[in-house]
Each structure stands twice: as C-alpha cells, then as structure tokens.
Image (spheres, helix red, strand yellow):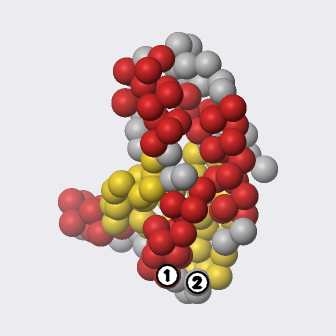
Amino acid sequence: MSLVSIKKQVDGSVEHICNKITETIPSIGFGILTRIDFDKKIQEKLNEGINKTVILGACHPKLALEAYRQTTDVTLLMPCNIVVREIDDGTVLVEAIRPSQMLQMLNEVSPSDTLHEAEQNLENFILAL
C-alpha cells in the first residue's frame, strides 16, 4: 500500500464507480464537493485524448474544520481528491490521497483522532469498492 495514496483496481465503468462513490461516501463522513472530467478538459483545451479520468473533490467537514482552526492554509489543499481512471474497458483504478500525507505539508496541523479515523474510514471504503 502506498504511503501517499490509497488505491484499488475495480471492475466497472468510470461513471458507475463515480456514482457509487458519490452516493455512498457520506456514510463515512465525507461528501463530494466537485467533479472534474479531466479527460474532457484535456480534449477541450489541448485537443489530446487520454483515458477517461474523473477527479472527485471529497471533503470530511469535521476534519476540514479541525485543520482550518489550526491554520487557514489548509484551504489551499482542499478538497481531497479521489481519482477514478479507466485502465481499460470495464476496469478502473480508484485513487485517493491520504489525508495524513496531505496535511503533513502544514506544520501547524497536529495529527488527531479525527484525522486517523477519517483516513482509516476512507481506506476501508476504497478497499471495499
């Protein structure tokens, strides 16, 4: 398992997996704030084709507020990204940055029970997809 991210290859389409994540991630305290269809933006801006790739901007409000109260610099790192990328037809890779690694950039933010719980829940969530 990567120190920087949580990854799992799953069967399904990018659209199906994105919908599943968006619908079920609130059960672990996260929500999806944004969606970027990265492949479409690359096609639109550069006329280049890449595999279907969606970036979901996820947020754990309790963790975000806790970190914000320690330093407003945390807003530069929000939301946490979950990437759903097509590997081939019917197979996608789901990747999420580990909140602990993201917040490690900010010396003012102390690790907390909320951080550890949110990260463990996110890892369990992705690995269960």
Q: State the separation of the CA atoms marked 2 and 1.
A: 6 Å
Q: Which residue is drawn at the image coordinates 46% and 76% (left, top)?
A: 19
Q: Which residue is drawn at the image coordinates 30% and 69% (left, top)?
A: 40
Residue 47 shows up from this direction? yes
Q: Which residue extends farthest right?
A: 1
Above or below residue 85? Residue 68 is: above
Q: In front here: 25 or 92?
A: 25
In the rendered image, residue 7, in percent from the top left (x then y), is placed at: 67, 58
Q: Which residue is drawn at the image coordinates 50% and 45% (left, top)?
A: 60
Return the mark for residue 65. none
Please give left or right for residue 12 compared with residue 80 in the image: right
Q: Which residue extends farthest left?
A: 45
Residue 14 shows up from this direction? no
The 10 Å Cα crowd at callout 1, few under 14, some 14 to 19, many 20 or more, is few
Label 2 sits on residue: 12
Element at label 1 = helix
In the rendered image, residue 4, in percent from the top left (x then y), is placed at: 65, 40
Callout 2–callout 1 Cβ contact below 8 Å: yes
In the rendered image, residue 58, in percent from the top left (x then y), is placed at: 46, 52
Label 1 sits on residue: 16
Q: Quadrant of residue 9?
A: bottom right
Element at label 2 = loop
